[in-house]
Image (cartoon, coloured by chain):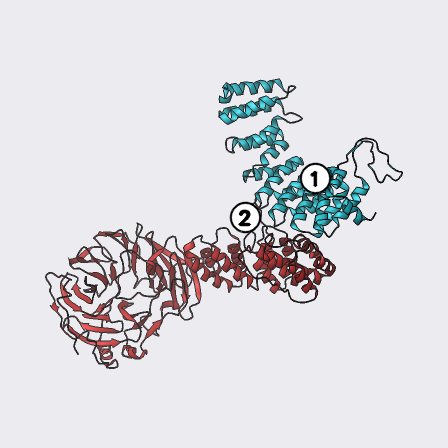
Chain colours: A red, B cyan
């Protein structure tokens, strides 16, 4: 059944001096019969292109009416003033904007106005092939779509109005590629005003775009317009998806093309994925790398496994960017566009738009940028990012800490220790660092060095080392060298009680005759105390010290304490159980009253 | 009479009073010098041995009230109760309840035996604030090398009160070699360090302290300047006049009040030149007009 069109209802896009015709074809007929890709395959075979490379530019938005642009190769930035109702679109050789009832196009390289005409609604996106720009607009009614094909002289070649939600189009050689209803791409002959072919996709498809001289369609993943495009309906086309990796903020490669991006960058602009699909050969992404941004942090990931390759911290929050062959161009709120090497994450260069931005769109098609020089190790990169004192970054820093924990290097160990010991580290990150340290089975030398540090008010050491996690790790490694330093920490009131508990537990495994005095001293000073004088963790430490003393050969001390009326009444049966070789009848459980921080005022 | 019966027969108050028998009058000691106060050449009071034994027995009791009585008695005896210190130290070394530990620490502070410093030092690092603070206070009277080391550690403590006690303690122990740490502590807002610096500094190092005039609060500075003014062996007049001049230059009401107070306390036999400088300064400052 042919679908009726609502031309009148959608005429909120007012066009003046149209040069093209109104279309009444069956281009968006949902009753279309699936031809198993026959027509689109035939069209692809006959399609010669060319698909031109787009301009390599960054275009920033400053305020509500200023556009600034710069070539990624680094010329003087251009500026253009026009009211803006939404995010401009950069495609091919043009920048398309919509605001105050005017649709306009600029030369992306120079900022020169190419054309403008009256229009309403909100801009979804555009495609451009160097001669014609195809623009998808959400009408002011908020329903359906208007697609305008306008040549660079400003003449409307074609106007399409339809109830379907048409995403971001591409255009090449007089054909518009129109994604709609999230599953179709209609190939539309702009001159004839009719659908030439249609591809059916089994994954969300709301964007068409040109990259590297090839057309692509997609949203969550990307399908290349090549000889296998007819197999898209059976998921056998040349498609690529990024690994389904759990990252903070759940970044996406591309937003739905039917959305109308707000003028100012939002969270989904700051937290997103960047990858460049390969224009030929096996489907994949360029260089086998993709990038994930999280506000001012970017991480590089392996496109096959999702494993972390590098990490980089920017000076400001990233608002937009693009992947190019060999790297990523990322534009931040200060107006800087930074080029990162895809393999190493090394900064290979910058260009500057010259003013703070509220949004930024980058297109990098033929662009490449390389530089030589030393590259920090992954451990150093993670350490740099993890140490940033920015609460907003904690979720990403936690991810990076998990990665750091997998690295067996002295720097990884010391970074975890530093993070767990620093006043500037966010609490959630401290916990993550402590957990990672506790599970660590390498880096004993660095751990011992850390344990030799103490709280020292005059020296400005205001947080003791993470004694508990280090005790766990060193006990698991059975490193006897830890015994004296752990025993010394028993007597340090700056050591949090939970760390004391864990140090005492480690001393059961590691303690020897030479530790008998500090263990005895702790046992003596705390065996008479109960809650709330000390918390459950300290009492558990007393029990562990008793076990250590028995093991070391000071059983009589514990036996005397177990029957001494001045031993805390709750501890006596626990000591008796330990003496009898039985487990502690009241093993420690964390309770709200327990102190995991220093007991100091 | 057995020790147990004796303990029961001596109420705490009586024991305390008994320990306070600090007579300097000649006593009728028996041949072995037991059972009564034994006069010494210096006529210093000593503890009655029997009473001492009774208190020691109380300290060894399994009853908290007995132990507390013993500790109270020992504390009341002050320095005379020095023979009891080892028993109290043993109590702390073995470990006990919080109230008894606190009473034991206070008793050792009252007795002031240098031997107690070692056990008290370990309690300065106790996790319970009232115990570590009591131990830091007590160390001030036990003195000795262990106390000195404990105070130097205590300056670095996370507990502000322990830092303060330690700074004061170092001054009272005349620990001149701790001056660098005291200056560091002063710069880290351990204000108690000022008075100790004033006690310990030389003409040269006092200058380093006085250089902080105008940057540290005046009450902190005067707590260190006071001991500079009133040294048993006074500083040269020139130095003191210089200090007066610096305070005068502050021109504040507080400085005037302080100098007036110093003038009021200036010893009759003290330097006339310094006194004149004080009078002149006081007259020139707001408070002097009053």
Q: Quadrant of residue A363?
A: bottom left
Q: Position of residue B93 (x, y in %)?
A: 71, 50
**Given the current orientation, which residue lies at the most extreme right position?**
B31
Q: Which residue is mark 1?
A: B110
Using the rendered image, report if marks 1 and 2 lie on a common chain. Answer: no
In the image, A544 versus A246, the foreground residue is: A544
Question: Pointer 2: what residue?
Answer: A462
Q: Is residue A563 visible?
A: yes
Nearer mark to the viewer, of 1 and 2: 1
Within 10 Å of disc 2 (Cα), the crowding (few <14, some 14-19, many 20+) is some
Relative image position of residue B196 (x, y in whole percent)? 61, 34
Mark 1 chain = B
Q: Is residue A540 left or right of residue A397?
A: right
Residue A515: name its quadrant: bottom right
Question: In the rendered view, does A109 fall on the left or right side of B154?
Answer: left
x and y percentages locating residue A94 in the rendered image:
22, 60
Position of residue A535 measured from the top left corner of the image (x, y, whole percent) = 59, 55
Q: CA distance from mark 1 to mark 2?
A: 33 Å
Give whichever of A324, A398 is nearer the camera.
A398
Question: Which structural element holds mark 2?
Answer: loop
The answer to whether residue A481 is seen in the rendering is no
The residue positioned 11% from the left and 68% from the top of the image is A21
Q: Quadrant of the N terminus of chain A?
A: bottom left
Question: Element type at marker 1?
Answer: helix
Above or below A316: residue A400: below
């Amino acid at each position: 059944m042919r679908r009726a069109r609502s031309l009148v209802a959608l005429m909120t896009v007012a066009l003046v001096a149209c040069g093209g015709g109104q279309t009444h074809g069956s281009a968006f007929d949902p009753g279309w019969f699936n031809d198993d890709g026959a027509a689109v395959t035939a069209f692809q075979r006959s399609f010669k292109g060319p698909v031109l490379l787009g301009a390599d530019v960054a275009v920033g938005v400053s305020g509500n009416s200023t556009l600034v642009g710069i070539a990624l190769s680094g010329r003087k930035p251009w500026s253009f003033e026009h009211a803006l109702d939404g995010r401009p679109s950069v495609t091919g050789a043009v920048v398309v904007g919509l605001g105050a009832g005017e649709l306009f196009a600029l030369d992306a390289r120079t900022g020169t106005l190419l054309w403008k005409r009256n229009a309403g609604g909100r801009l979804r996106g555009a495609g451009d092939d160097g001669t014609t720009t195809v623009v998808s607009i959400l009408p002011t009614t908020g329903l359906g779509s208007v697609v305008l094909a306008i040549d660079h002289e400003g003449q409307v070649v074609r106007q399409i109005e339809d109830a379907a939600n048409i995403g971001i189009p591409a255009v090449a050689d007089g054909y518009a590629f129109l994604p709609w209803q999230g599953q179709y791409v209609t190939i539309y002959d702009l001159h004839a005003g009719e659908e030439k072919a249609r591809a059916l996709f089994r994954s969300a498809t709301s964007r068409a775009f040109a990259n590297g001289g090839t057309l692509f369609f997609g949203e969550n993943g990307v399908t290349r317009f090549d000889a296998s495009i007819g197999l898209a309906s059976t998921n056998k086309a040349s498609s690529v998806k990024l690994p389904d990796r759990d990252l903070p903020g759940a970044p996406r490669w591309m937003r739905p093309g039917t959305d109308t991006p707000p003028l100012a960058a939002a969270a989904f602009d700051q937290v997103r994925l960047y990858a460049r699909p390969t224009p030929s050969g096996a489907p994949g992404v360029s260089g086998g790398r993709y990038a994930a941004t999280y506000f001012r942090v970017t991480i590089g990931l392996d496109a096959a496994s999702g494993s972390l390759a590098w990490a980089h911290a920017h000076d400001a929050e990233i608002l937009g960017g693009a992947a190019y062959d060999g790297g990523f161009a990322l534009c931040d709120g200060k107006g800087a566009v930074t080029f990162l090497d895809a393999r190493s994450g090394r900064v290979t260069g910058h260009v500057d738009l010259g003013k703070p931005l509220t949004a930024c769109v980058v297109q990098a098609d033929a662009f490449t940028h390389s530089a030589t020089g030393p590259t920090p190790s992954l451990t150093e990169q993670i350490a740099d990012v993890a140490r940033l004192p920015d609460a907003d970054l904690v979720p990403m820093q936690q991810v990076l800490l998990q990665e750091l924990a997998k690295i067996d290097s002295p720097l990884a160990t010391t970074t975890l220790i530093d993070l767990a010991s620093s006043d500037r580290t966010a609490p959630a990150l401290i916990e993550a660092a402590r957990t990672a340290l506790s599970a660590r089975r390498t880096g004993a030398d660095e751990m011992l060095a850390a344990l030799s540090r103490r709280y020292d008010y005059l020296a400005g050491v205001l947080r003791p080392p993470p004694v508990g996690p280090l005790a766990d790790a060193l006990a698991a490694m059975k490193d006897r060298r830890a015994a004296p330093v752990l025993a010394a920490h028993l007597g340090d009131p700056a050591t949090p009680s939970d760390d004391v508990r864990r140090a005492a537990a480690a001393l059961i495994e590691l303690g020897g005759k030479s530790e008998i005095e500090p263990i005895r001293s702790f046992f003596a000073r705390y065996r008479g105390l109960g809650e709330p004088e000390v918390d459950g963790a300290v009492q558990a430490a007393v029990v562990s010290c008793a076990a250590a003393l028995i093991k070391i050969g000071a059983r009589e001390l514990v036996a005397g304490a177990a029957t001494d009326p001045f031993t805390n009444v709750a501890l006596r049966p626990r000591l008796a159980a330990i003496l009898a070789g039985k487990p502690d009848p009241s093993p420690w459980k964390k309770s709200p009253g327990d102190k995991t921080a220093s007991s100091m005022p | 009479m057995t020790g147990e019966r004796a303990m029961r027969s001596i109420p705490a108050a009586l024991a305390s009073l008994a320990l306070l028998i600090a007579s300097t009058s000649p006593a009728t000691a028996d041949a072995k010098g037991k059972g009564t106060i034994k006069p010494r050449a210096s006529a210093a009071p000593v503890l009655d041995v029997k009473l001492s034994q009774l208190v020691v027995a109380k300290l060894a009791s399994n009853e908290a009230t007995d132990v507390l009585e013993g500790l109270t008695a020992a504390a009341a005896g002050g320095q005379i109760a020095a023979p009891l210190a080892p028993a109290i130290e043993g109590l702390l070394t073995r470990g006990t309840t919080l109230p008894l530990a606190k009473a034991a620490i206070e008793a050792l502070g009252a007795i002031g035996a240098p031997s107690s410093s070692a056990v008290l030092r370990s309690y300065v690092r106790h996790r319970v604030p009232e115990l570590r603070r009591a131990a830091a206070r007590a160390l001030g009277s036990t003195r000795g090398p262990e106390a000195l080391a404990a105070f130097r550690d205590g300056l670095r403590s996370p507990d502000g009160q322990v830092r303060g006690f330690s700074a004061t303690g170092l001054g009272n122990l005349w620990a001149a070699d701790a001056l660098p740490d005291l200056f560091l502590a002063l710069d880290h807002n351990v204000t108690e360090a000022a008075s100790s610096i004033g006690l310990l500094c030389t003409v040269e190092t006092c200058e380093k302290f006085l250089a902080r005039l105008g940057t540290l609060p005046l009450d902190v500075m005067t707590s260190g300047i006071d001991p500079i003014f009133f040294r048993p062996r006074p500083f040269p007049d020139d130095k003191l006049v210089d200090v007066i001049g610096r305070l005068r230059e502050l021109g504040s009401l507080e400085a005037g009040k302080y100098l007036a107070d110093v003038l009021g306390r200036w010893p009759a036999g003290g330097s006339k030149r310094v006194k004149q400088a004080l009078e002149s300064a006081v007259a020139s400052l707001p408070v002097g007009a009053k």
